[in-house]
Image (tube, rainbow, N blue to C red):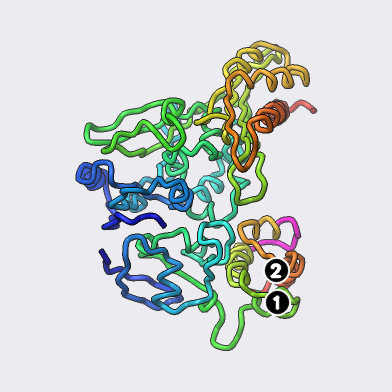
């Protein structure tokens, strides 16, 4: 049976009807049209669906939409300001960190928590912070380079 | 997700609301906290017949407090909050907890809870092994009030625990300890998001003569249907002078207390071989930490 819930996503309030088994990922993509979180493994293993809940990265395929009420939800759509991209997005373009692009929005959100928390430019720490995300194209180095360049510039 | 019978989602705000829901649904309610193993349960066909999901994170069961004997951890305290608790990441006696929290990716740390980690009774999880070596106790609440049991008595077999259909895990108690103690936890895994092939936690003190005492060794990660204590190895080490040989001998002895499974992650033979190695290493690490506490050089 669908129950009404209110979700706050990228500073907008949405009132939606969701079945109790629907994940946050399904609701974001299929009801709200926010397609940056990707459906990859849909089992909490690949990280493509990573979004922020109250500033922390979570797998949206593994959180029920009902559990996400009363939280601040942020997707990639919410990190740029109009046409002005987030420094991480700029860095991913500059460093060529995007190939097929399917993992990119999840990795951006993981990297954003790292940068938001003042993460440094040590490669080992950056790799550790991205351990919950898989990329099958880039071999990770260019992604790490992109995050490192933002950490070094202390912008974001 | 195989939640085909699911009808409703609840978010109780106190124990009596929760107990009343549990009574209404009997065996067909599933208590939910972080939800980070929900796909694991689905894959094992363990969500069959669940009619109600009950998210208990709004009940205020969070945070670490203390009484004269124990540190008390609310069941829905997230792993990220434990990792940031200075008691656990600075006191060597509780280092096994901090060690166990270095393995999961942030997407798990940010949602998974200590209570969910224990109550799932998954034989591959890490924190239960660490907490077993620290001799943690559990508070269980239900229709008839609260009762305490030892963590050792909680898990019965894979994904089965002692909770009655109207009971829930509310609190984890970690005994306070003397200063002269250290612990360690090690996990063998294939990648950051994988379950353990083997995990081991050790805790030990040194007496006034420098001999091992209060030795506790726990193993998990599929070395049996539940995490287990390695009692024979613990007894072997009691009152003995610490040495590489002793740590290796203890590693050999754990085989008598485990009964590893074979699955797609590892064969029973490989788990046995690694249980020995990781026991020895976790004892070495605990010992090095005790020496550091005492201010001796290693």
Which residue is identified by label 1?
A91
Q: Give the Cα distance between marks 1 and 2.
A: 7 Å
- SS at mark 1? helix
At 28% across and 55% down in the image, what residue appears? B10
At 38% across and 26% down in the image, what residue appears? B149
Which residue is the extreme one toward the right? B297
Q: Are marks 1 and 2 on the same chain?
A: yes
Residues in magenta? Answer: A118-125
Residue A121 is one of the magenta-drawn residues: yes
Residue A27 in percent (x, y) is at 40, 71
Residue B248: image quadrant is: top right
Residue B295 in percent (x, y) is at 73, 28
Residue A110 is one of the magenta-drawn residues: no
Asked if residue B41 lies left or right of residue B248, the reply is left
Label 2 neighbourhood size at 10 Å, few (<14), some (14-19), many (20+)?
A: many
Q: Nearer the viewer, residue B282 or A11?
A: B282
Find out whether the residues at labels 1 and 2 contact each other: C-beta distance under 8 Å. yes
Q: Earlier in the sequence, mark 1 or mark 2?
A: 1
Label 1 neighbourhood size at 10 Å, few (<14), some (14-19), many (20+)?
A: many
User: Which numbered marker is on residue A77?
Assistant: none
> Does the image show residue B10?
yes
Which residue is identified by label 2?
A147
Q: Quadrant of the N terminus of chain B?
A: bottom left
Asked if residue A124 lies left or right of residue A28, the reply is right
- Does A100 sit above or below residue B127? below
């Amino acid at each position: 049976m669908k129950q009404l819930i209110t979700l706050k996503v990228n500073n907008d309030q949405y009132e939606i009807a969701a079945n109790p088994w629907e994940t946050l990922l399904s609701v974001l993509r299929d009801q709200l049209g926010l397609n940056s979180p990707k459906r990859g493994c849909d089992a909490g293993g690949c990280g493509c669906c990573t979004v922020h809940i109250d500033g922390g990265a979570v797998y949206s395929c593994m959180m029920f939409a009902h559990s996400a009420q009363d939280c601040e939800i942020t997707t990639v759509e919410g990190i740029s300001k109009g046409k002005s991209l987030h420094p991480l997005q700029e860095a991913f373009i500059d460093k060529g960190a995007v190939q097929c692009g399917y993992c990119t929005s999840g990795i951006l959100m993981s990297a954003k928590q790292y940068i938001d928390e003042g993460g440094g430019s040590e490669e080992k720490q950056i790799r550790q912070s991205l351990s919950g995300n898989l990329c099958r194209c880039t071999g990770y180095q260019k992604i790490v380079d992109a995050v490192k360049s933002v950490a070094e510039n202390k912008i974001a | 997700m195989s939640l085909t019978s699911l009808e409703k989602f609840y978010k109780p705000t106190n124990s009596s609301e929760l107990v009343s829901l549990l009574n209404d649904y009997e065996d067909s309610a599933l208590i939910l906290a972080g939800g980070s193993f929900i796909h694991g349960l689905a894959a094992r066909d363990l969500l069959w017949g669940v009619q109600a999901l009950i998210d208990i994170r709004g009940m205020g069961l969070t945070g670490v407090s203390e009484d004269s004997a124990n540190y008390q951890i609310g069941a829905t305290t997230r792993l990220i909050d434990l990792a940031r608790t200075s008691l656990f990441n600075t006191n060597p006696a509780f280092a096994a907890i901090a060690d166990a929290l270095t393995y999961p990716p942030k997407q798990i740390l940010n949602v998974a809870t200590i209570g969910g980690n224990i109550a799932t009774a998954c034989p591959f999880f890490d924190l239960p092994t660490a907490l077993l070596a620290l001799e943690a106790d559990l508070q269980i609440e239900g229709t008839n009030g609260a009762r305490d049991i030892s963590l050792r008595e909680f898990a019965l077999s894979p994904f089965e625990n002692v909770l009655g259909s109207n009971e829930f895990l509310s609190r984890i108690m970690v005994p306070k300890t003397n200063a002269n103690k250290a612990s360690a936890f090690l996990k063998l895994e294939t990648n950051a998001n994988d379950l353990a092939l083997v995990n081991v936690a050790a805790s030990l003190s040194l007496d006034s003569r420098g001999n091992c005492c209060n030795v506790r060794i726990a193993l998990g990660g599929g070395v049996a249907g539940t995490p287990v204590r390695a009692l024979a190895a613990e007894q072997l080490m009691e009152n003995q002078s610490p040495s590489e040989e002793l740590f290796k001998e203890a590693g050999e002895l754990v085989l008598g207390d485990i009964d590893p499974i074979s699955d797609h992650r590892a064969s029973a033979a490989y788990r046995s071989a690694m249980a020995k190695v990781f026991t020895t290493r976790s004892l070495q690490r605990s010992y090095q930490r005790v020496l550091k506490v005492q201010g001796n050089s290693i």
